[in-house]
Image (tube, rainbow, N blue to C red):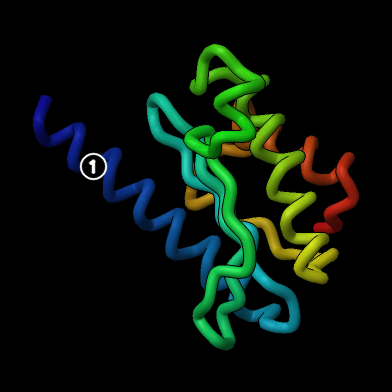
Amino acid sequence: MKGKVVNLRSGLERRKIRVRTEIRRTADRPRLCVVRTLKHVYAQVIDDRTGTTVASASTLSPEIREQVKRTWTKEAAQAVGKLIAQKSKEKGVSTVAFDRSGRKYHGRIKALADAARESGLAF
């Protein structure tokens, strides 16, 4: 059992590296990095040229905590997507490259991306 967990983890790490190298080739736009854990969803807009975070949102944000009861649902991920789009547009960022951190594009990752697109963020 232990060997299987290690192999799955290394596959996730390989996919994460592959996705990030493709995204860094398009350095003209910041990267929307999404991290999913069992309880929370985190999103950051990162400028790789300067290495700074332009905007960030998560299910731990006070705005989201007031809106949702459970932080591990698709509805919570949609709220994070709307908030990250709003914060990044306030900072003058309207186009980003989507970094899913090696995760499959479904479920909470897809819900966050769709909500960010609906709120005016282009990627």
- Residue at image location 38% in from the left, 57% down from the top: 14
Q: Nearer the viewer, residue 99 or 46?
A: 46
Percent coordinates x, y for residue 75 in the rendering = 67, 20
Q: Is residue 55 left or right of residue 70?
A: right
Q: Secondary structure at mark 1?
A: helix
Say above or below: 102 vs 55: above
- Residue at 68% x, 72% y: name it: 30
Image: 13 above or below 24: above
User: Looking at numbered disc 1 in the image, what kind of residue is underneath it?
Assistant: Asn
**In this rendering, is residue 49 above or below 54?**
below
Q: How many marks?
A: 1
Q: Find residue 65 and report its horizontal and vertical position in percent.
A: 55, 26
Query: How far across and down, in percent of the image, does residue 32 sit?
Result: 64, 58
Q: Quadrant of residue 97?
A: bottom right
The percent position of residue 27, horizontal first and vertical second, equals 67, 82
Q: Is residue 98 left or right of residue 89?
A: left
Quarter of the image where the N terminus is located: top left
Please name whichever residue, 16 or 80, is drawn nearer the observer in this view of the structure: 80
The quarter of the displayed image where residue 76 is located: top right
**Going 70% across and 30% down the picture, which residue do you hit?**
78
Q: Which residue is mark 1?
A: 7
Q: Residues within 10 Å of mark 1 (few under 14, many from 20)?
A: few
Q: Residue furthest left?
A: 2
The residue at 84%/64% (across/down) is 94
